[in-house]
Image: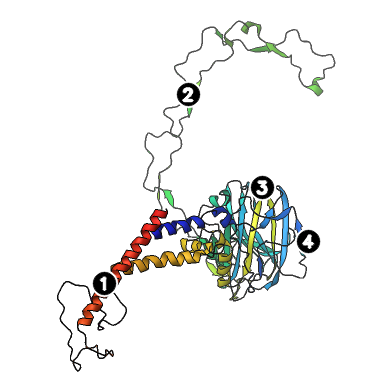
Amino acid sequence: MRLHVVLFCVYLRSMTASPQDDAKSLYRSPQIPDEAFFAETFDSGPLDRYVGEWALEEPANSVLAGNRGLVLKSPGRHHGIAAYLRTPFYFNDKPLILQYEVLFQNGIDCGGAYIKLLSDSSQLRLSYFNDATPYSIMFGPDKCGSIYKVHFIICDIDPLMAVRQERHARQPDVDLTEYFTDRKPHIYTLYLHPDHSYEIFIDQSLISKGNLLEDMDPPLGPPSEILDPNDKKPEDWDDRPHIPDPMATKPLDWDENAPALIPDPSVQRPPGWLEEELPLIPNPEAQRPYDWDDEMDGEWEAPQIPNPACLQAIGCGPWSPPLISNPAYKGKWNPPMVKNPGYQGLWQPRTIPNPAASEDPQPVQLHPVAAVGLELWSVTGGVLFDNILLCDDLEVARRWTKDTWGQRQAPGIVERLLMATDKRPWLWGVYVFTVGLPIILFISFMWPDKRFGPPHMDYYYKKTDEPQPDVSQHPEGPSSLWAYGAGSPAGPRRRENRRAQKKSDLEFKASIAMAVSLHEEEE
């Protein structure tokens, strides 16, 4: 058994001798699904239509050697890049599945990493792709300031206004901060089903779901009911929640004419105040101008100057005490308010069917998609995109996720053991020996006398100290030995066979013990 442990440790050591090198050599470029409308891994290929600086390169902290992505390089600039689908995608009776990976290698201060599904039209030219290019769906992460979002926007033509209208899905109720700040790759997935329901996933975890008919802002299509513009409020409608108490009366001592302010009775006129003198007096030295015309200029008056008698006084002119609040002031009396027993609530017009509402069983009519595009403005560079997929088959999406995103996930113990044989095929022999040896030893030590075959044969017996009855030797008896073709009855030969069998078992055990001992001496 110790030999088995030693061999097991040896193969584990050989398997983990260079884990970093092995981990980086495990990337396998996935096979592009034939069923996909668009699939791109950015493992190779030139960039031909783009605005801004883009690059195909591995991330700074690469987990899989050779796994390249599309990197937005230049910060603080507008970036755009697009590619046509294999065939246009039509919104019919199949789901739309859009997913891709995003890695904010340098974090993000303000900017987006969303993808646009460009609408199919005869005017679509990817060489002129910009922010005004019509799109059907926009999806992906966006951040500015302290607000973290995952956009899901549909763009359709408003039937009333005949203009394209953006409709935003409500934001998820979960905290999205970690997905923008941990500097790890994350996979964003959108499922849009034929029944107009949608699901949004991050790292294969559901973060939001809803329905295009109920959870978009502004709502998709006009409402089924509207307020009647011709409905009028009845004249006897009482919408006053409170009314003056009709049983209340004004108290007898309530003086409505009392002033709010009164002179302060505790203040007296200061001594030395010249109440008879005016603060200003006519200038006695002033002369009337010679050209003054009373009919045209009015009666002439001498200009005012400070009264010399008041220069040394505390004050001159009429004196009055300062005003204070009147303690007897109560103001106008009003009865207290009580609940209105005849209150009928706030009146609003009745609702009627909306004549502009559509009875179309397919109210969501999105334009077919002809291309995918990244049209972004980001303050921070180093945003990496990878493994973009657009398809209409959930199984294709699951297989693509396993072949791309799944390679980054930590493999289980069984998968790691199998992956180790790619470079070391001889490990298969170690696996077989490691698993098979303990089974053989366990059976040999626990059942040393067990032999395969029916228990009725003369070479099968159970080890016991109890005396065993002799088997009947009558050739026509019920013994099953004759049924199995035994040519002669059992007798002394059977006991000899038992002794020979025990001897061979002891020799087998001794040989195993000697092999273990020799192995320990060599160590």
Element at label 2: strand
Q: First in sequence: mark 4 or mark 3?
A: 4
Q: Amino acid at mark 2?
A: Ile
Magenta range is 450-468
- In percent of width and height, residue 240 lies at 46, 53
Between 38 and 64, the one nearer to me in the picture: 64
Element at label 1: helix
Closer to viewer: mark 1 or mark 4: 1
Q: Quadrant of residue 26?
A: bottom right
Crowding at mark 1 (Cα within 10 Å: few <14, some 14-19, many 20+): few
Closer to viewer: mark 1 or mark 2: 1
Closer to viewer: mark 4 or mark 2: 4
Crowding at mark 2 (Cα within 10 Å: few <14, some 14-19, many 20+): few
Report whether 128 appears left or right of 376: right
Q: Which mark is residue 356?
A: none
Q: First in sequence: mark 4 or mark 2?
A: 4
Q: Which mark is residue 380?
A: 3
Q: Which mark is residue 324?
A: 2
Distance CA(mark 2)–CA(mark 3): 66 Å
Closer to viewer: mark 2 or mark 3: 3
Q: Amino acid at mark 3?
A: Thr
Task: Give me the residue at 64% from left, 48% from top.
Answer: 110
Q: Which residue is mark 4?
A: 128
459 drawn magenta:
yes
Closer to viewer: mark 3 or mark 1: 1
Q: Amino acid at mark 1?
A: Lys
Element at label 4: helix
Q: In this orientation, does residue 227 appear?
A: no
Distance CA(mark 3)–CA(mark 1): 81 Å
Task: Give me the residue at 82% from left, 19% from top.
Answer: 293
